[in-house]
Image (cartoon, rainbow, N blue to C red):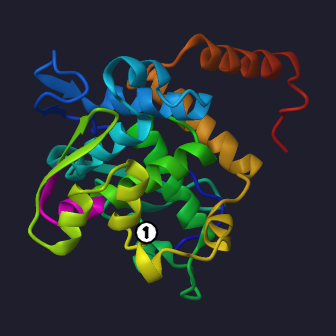
Amino acid sequence: MVKANTVTKASKASKAPTVTVGTGIWPEAETIDWSAKLHEAAGEVITGKAMATEGKNRGASALAVMVEAFASDDVAARPWTFDIMGKGGDVHTHVRCTGTTEFGNDDLPWKRNAQGAISREAQAAYKTGLQLEFFGQAPNASLWTTASNAILIARAIREEGMTAKVEGGSVKLEGGTSDKAKAMREAKSLAALGKVAKDETGSNRAKPSNDKVADVRQATPNEITLAACAIVKLIAKGEITEGQNVLGNIREIVRLFNSNPEAFAED
């Protein structure tokens, strides 16, 4: 069961493996550090650039990078963990995950509250944990939307026994024997691939517009500050690196804390 007030943190031991690929976006490299590339893709999504420079020069896109990454065996099998915290600040549930296997599965015990209903707190904790683990980013609506799309496409690729490689600004697929696999291989764009992968073509194409609205909510101050603490801990341990804009924000928080001790005094 999951209580309110949650926090997630990346697994201490987890580190994205290096994946061997063919001549994809970075043909000059024999191996790709997917951790670095996913962090880069996330940054471009958040800033709104969508990897424009890479796209112009090498045919890359943030979504394509994410699809290829999540479809790879190593990233899909990557173990990671996060903690769900109770109201008292103690760890209520320690959750172990594998890649994106738990994504979208609301029947897992830790995603249910004491009444057996889906826990929004647990969902938010997982979303925060996944974004921290794979992208090194605090919760962001644009990032979550792009990552969710990539995960669903990558899941269909793996379910059809296919492999993915970024080429020419899109994802080239190989393998698969079903009609769906054939349609995915023949998709002319990532948008078209996404519709086929998620069975949104034909009569199933239209989905209620309020589905996406219901999945997006404003993060609470508690969730934001808990995510910030998790990021600071990872930076302090040297597990992630951030730019001066993020470090400057952290320094400003420290300055405000030290300059206003009464405002932050414990009750």
**Total marks in image:** 1
Residue 14: horizontal and vertical position, in percent? 28, 39
Look at 19% across and 60% down and name the residue there: 158
Compared with 8, 29 (above or below) is above
Residue 266 relative to residue 238: left or right: right
**Residue 171 in view (yes/no):** yes
- Image x and y of residue 263, in percent: 90, 31
Q: Residue furthest bottom?
A: 115
Q: Is residue 181 left or right of residue 138?
A: left
Neighbourhood count class around disc 1 (C-alpha, 10 Å): few under 14, some 14–19, many 20 upward: few
Q: Say whether residue 31 is left or right of residue 197.
A: left
Residue at (65% x, 71% y) in the render: 209
Q: Is residue 44 magenta?
A: no
Q: Quadrant of the C terminus?
A: top right
* Horizontal arrangement in the rendering, residue 191 relative to residue 174 (left or right): right
Residue drawn at point x = 29 percent, y = 55 percent: 154
Q: Is residue 142 above or below residue 99?
A: above
Residue 161, magenta (yes or no): yes
Name above or below for residue 106 compared with residue 165.
below
Residue depicted at 58% across the width and 74% down the height: 119
Q: Inspect this view and state whether residue 102 appears.
A: no
Residue 264 picture quarter: top right
* Viewer-proximal residue among 188 and 266: 188
Secondary element type, mark 1:
loop
Badge 1 amino acid: Gly
Bounds of the magenta span? 155-163
**Whole-percent x, y for residue 18 in the image:** 17, 30
Residue under label 1: 104
Could you say which is closer to the camera, residue 155 or residue 113?
Answer: 155
x and y percentages locating residue 39 in the rendered image: 42, 30
Q: Along the line of sight, which residue is nearer the eye, 32 or 52?
A: 52
